[in-house]
Image: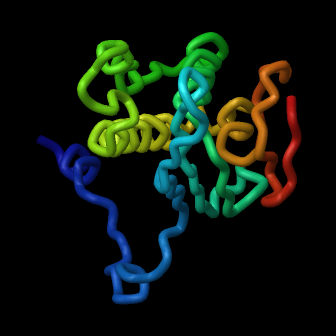
Amino acid sequence: MSDTAVADTRRLNSKPQDLTDAYGPPSNFLEIDIFNPQTVGVGRARFTTYEVRMRTNLPIFKLKESCVRRRYSDFEWLKNELERDSKIVVPPLPGKALKRQLPFRGDEGIFEESFIEERRQGLEQFINKIAGHPLAQNERCLHMFLQEEAIDRNYVPGKVLSLCCPGWRALV
């Protein structure tokens, strides 16, 4: 083997990490939490909503912090929009739990605390997988889901572009 072949396989010299680098704020972060489930309504109009809180410093998002309330059907809408308009593989949502919705059950069905907590965890995994995908971060539907108080189901699908200058954004 020649010396040039050996030189090509060596690691690049990098700066040693100090405590400020190791424990300082991350250069880019996106945190999404699903919490505070609330069941509202009565009878067949009863449903559970969840708070979706986002914190980020990614320039693609116009708001650096947001908190909105979403129900399971809103997560279904987001999944369907991404499957239709994006080129990413969309992970599954937690199941609909159809058996839990049958009448004459001896429990609260989909409104039981244990089920709501299990669903909350599944929804949190779902949204973090999607929002962590670089291509999904450009989708207008994800921005609307995370940052708009109400979802406009008649919106025009498209991409959100972050141009060269931080803080300067355009919708395509």
Towards the viewer: 103 or 112: 103
The colour mode here is rainbow
State which quarter of the image contains the N terminus. top left
Q: Where is residue 121 in the image (x, y as percent from the top left)?
A: 35, 44
* Residue 83 position within the rendered picture, expressed as x and y whole percent measured from the top left: 56, 14
Say if 1 sits above or below 157 in the image.
below
Q: Which of 140 and 71 is in front in this view?
A: 71
Q: Where is residue 50 in the image (x, y as percent from the top left)?
A: 53, 46
Q: Count the labels in the image.
A: 0
Pick the front one: 62 or 25: 62
- Residue 63 lies left or right of residue 71; in this view the side is right
* Residue located at (58% from left, 41% from top): 40
Q: In which quarter of the image is the C terminus?
A: top right
Q: Which residue is drawn at 17% across and 44% down?
A: 2
Q: State whether residue 134 is above or below residue 10.
A: above
Judge from the rendering whether residue 160 lies leftward or rightward of residue 168; answer left or right: left
Among all residues in the image, which is located at the extreme bottom? 19
Residue 43 x, y percent position in the rendering:
54, 25
Residue drawn at (35%, 89%) of the image:
19
Q: Is residue 97 above or below residue 119?
A: above
The quarter of the displayed image where residue 45 is located: top right
The foreground one among 168 and 12 is 168
Q: Which residue is drawn at 62% across and 39% down?
A: 137
